[in-house]
Amino acid sequence: MEEENFNKSKDKIMRILRNASKAKYYNKCFSDLNIDLSRDITYDEFKKIPVMDKNSYNANKFDLVTLDMKDFDMDYYNSLSKGNDKQEYLKRFKLRYMTTSGSTGQPLEVLKGYNDEYMDYFTLNYYRKKLSKYNFKGVFVWIWPENPIMRRFLNGDESNAGEKKYRSENRYGYKYHMHEHSDENFMDLYDFLIEKKCEWITSSPSVLYKLACFIQEKQLEYIKFEYIECHSEKMYEWQEEKIEEVFGCKPVSIYSSNEIQFMAGMCENKHLHMFNKGCFIEFLENNGIKEVCVTSLNYFDVPIIRYKLGDCGDWLYGESCDSALSKLPCFTLNGTRVNDLLKTKSGTIMEPFVITDSVHLMCNKFGLDIKQHKIKQLSPDSFAFYFSRKEVDCANEEYRSFLKDYLTALLEYDANVELNEIEDVEELKDGRKFKYFERCF
Ligand SMILES: [Zn+2]
């Protein structure tokens, strides 16, 4: 399957590889492997390129950039502790970063080029039009899980006053911030959707499902969307049914990640179809399981070639499909993101990334390099953090009190924090799939 897809996308893949050779990392890699890009290469040659994972990405990310970085001062960049200052500095190089926790408990800063991001959306829009008969001329809203405490801690700005719940993303729509699934927030969101006459929405399935339940419980008037797009999580059938019932439209599910965006879309027959205009996917066997490995066909500023996302799955062979995506190769994923949600004293649910943010902030503040962690919520007000002995000295009282302050600010009541050193976070693995956040009650 891979070889066939490789040959179909060969022109694009070759363009990506030739451009990537401008970056220090790939230049060395291709020359070490004697890959000659003056002619088209075969899939067998392509397979020689080493697979990149979160650790190797993190160690090499600035060497992946093909843009002019000769004035880039790494020591200066690393000395910046405020998120806004880092973004301002990166702007000079037409880059920005985004922080991701992924599903694996490895916080990661991902570098994004402006042109690459534009191409991501350009490709997605092409597939959106295939997936829906809607004309996409109306106002959209993008529910964005953003943590207000994070901004405060990252930028040292103590006040949250005047913080807007939404902002214009472009002239067609809005980004709406939501990290806490409370009645108050859902009421605000409902009013916002009515006031702005939003016609289409992108969000996680869990937020949409909860909004739908909220609307029914409060006996509010149903909202009609023309297009609904879900990201980030697996959508369950019971969620899909409720969403369609309240919003009058079947939600579309997109397979996406922060490192490489928008990789596939789900058709009505529940297959994931690879967006072959934007990426090239391989399933690589490792200890009897097959792992997703992606090459972006959109990234010229910061190429990502053969990147292992941490998800598992395989091609669906011989599956017939009558959907609009039927010509695209189809696959299935198993073991997608499985993290629990955080629960407060009052029963309000919060997204698990708010917890990972605390680890990211701690790394930033104390200059730590934490590759993997795990957090358990033992009760509404007590949390156990697990770090690898090699990476964190858990006896350090400053670390504990930093995490305690963060959680107390987030929850708005006193939180207890314990730090536990273990040999290796992998020890905590529950079955094959790793949960970085687990709620134990
Ligand atoms: Zn299909």
Image (cartoon, rainbow, N blue to C red):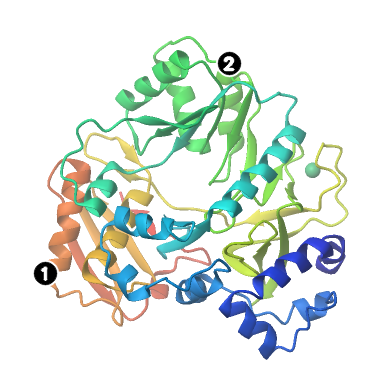
Whether pointer 2 and pointer 1 mark residues with C-beta atoms closer than 8 Å, the reply is no
Q: Give percent across and percent down for residue 22.
A: 63, 74
Q: Residue furthest front?
A: 71
Q: Give percent across and percent down for residue 117.
A: 57, 50
Q: Give percent across and percent down for residue 367.
A: 26, 72
Q: Is residue 204 left or right of residue 253?
A: left
Residue at image coords 62%, 85%: 28
Vertical placement of residue 257 versus 202, above or below: below
The answer for how far apart the CA atoms under marks 2 and 1 are is: 52 Å
- Residue 98 seen by the camera: no
Looking at the rendered structure, the kind of residue marked 2 is Lys
Mark 1 is surrounded, within 10 Å at the Cα level, by few (under 14), some (14 to 19) or many (20 or more) other residues, namely few
Q: Nearer the viewer, residue 419 or 28?
A: 28
Q: Is residue 248 left or right of residue 271?
A: left
Q: Quadrant of ligand 1?
A: top right
For residue 234, which quarter of the picture? top right
Residue at image coords 43%, 71%: 71
For residue 101, which quarter of the picture? bottom left
Q: SS at mark 2?
A: loop
Looking at the rendered structure, the kind of residue marked 1 is Glu
Residue at image coords 56%, 54%: 336
Mark 2 is surrounded, within 10 Å at the Cα level, by few (under 14), some (14 to 19) or many (20 or more) other residues, namely some
Name the mark on residue 224.
Answer: 2
Name the mark on residue 397.
Answer: 1
Vertical placement of residue 266 versus 32, above or below: above
Q: Mark 2 or mark 1: which comes first in sequence?
A: 2
Residue at image coords 69%, 74%: 285
Query: CB of residue at label 2: within 8 Å of ligand 1?
Result: no
